[in-house]
Amino acid sequence: MLVREVAALRASVARVRALYPFTIDAWVVLPDHLHAVWTLPEGDADFSTRWMLIKRGFSSRVGMGEHRSESRVAKRERGVWQRRFWERALRDETDFRRHVDYVHFNPVRHGVAGNAWEWPFSSFRWAVRRGDYPAGWGGHAAVEGDYGERQGS
């Protein structure tokens, strides 16, 4: 559903970014989940409100259609979203780059693309245009954690 309804997800993210600014450092949307690396403004650590509003905005833009467990039906929850999210404080530039690489390599890891460039629902192409990666980075031959040479590495 996330890929099929990516325009609704983008609209929801744009609306939330207008209300609660954040920088998208890396993002990938896969058919059944997504990953993101964000930078919030100095002194702001409110990831929860942002995710809640993104999820709510997306859910209100798309019709029901995903499978929902009895528990989710009883609690009037959508089946598209996990109940929680995992947030990590990145320690340094190496940790940051490792997480950005992980996000961009996810389509290959899940078998939906042969390399990161092939997957259109990702910030990878922006990163290539900025010169952060070569276009062929992160192909099938890459070993998780060693995805290929990055520009400036």
Image (cartoon, rainbow, N blue to C red):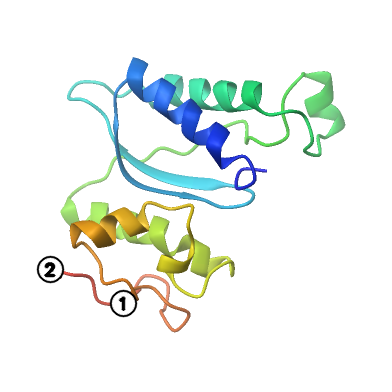
Structural crowding at the residue carrying mark 1, measured as other residues with C-alpha within 10 Å and reported as few (<14), some (14–19) or many (≥20) = some
Query: What residue do we see at 56% from left, 52% from top?
Result: 30
Task: Determine the image quadrant of residue 138.
Answer: bottom left
Residue carrying label 1: 148
Task: Determine the image quadrant of residue 134.
Answer: bottom left
Badge 1 marks a residue whose secondary structure is: loop
Task: Determine the image quadrant of residue 38.
Answer: top left
Badge 2 marks a residue whose secondary structure is: loop
- The image position of residue 54, as x and y in percent, is 50, 26
Dot 2 amino acid type: Gly
Query: What residue do we see at 83% from left, 34% from top?
Result: 69
- 108 vs 61, left or right, is left
Of 45 and 100, the residue lying toward us? 100
- The image position of residue 31, as x and y in percent, is 63, 51
Kindly report the distance in space between the C-alpha atoms of the residues bearing marks 1 and 2.
12 Å
Q: Which mark is residue 102?
A: none
Residue carrying label 2: 152
Of 89 and 113, the residue lying toward us? 113
Dot 1 amino acid type: Gly
- 64 vs 42, left or right, is right
Of 120 and 17, the residue lying toward us? 120
Q: Quadrant of the C terminus?
A: bottom left
- The image position of residue 4, as x and y in percent, is 64, 45
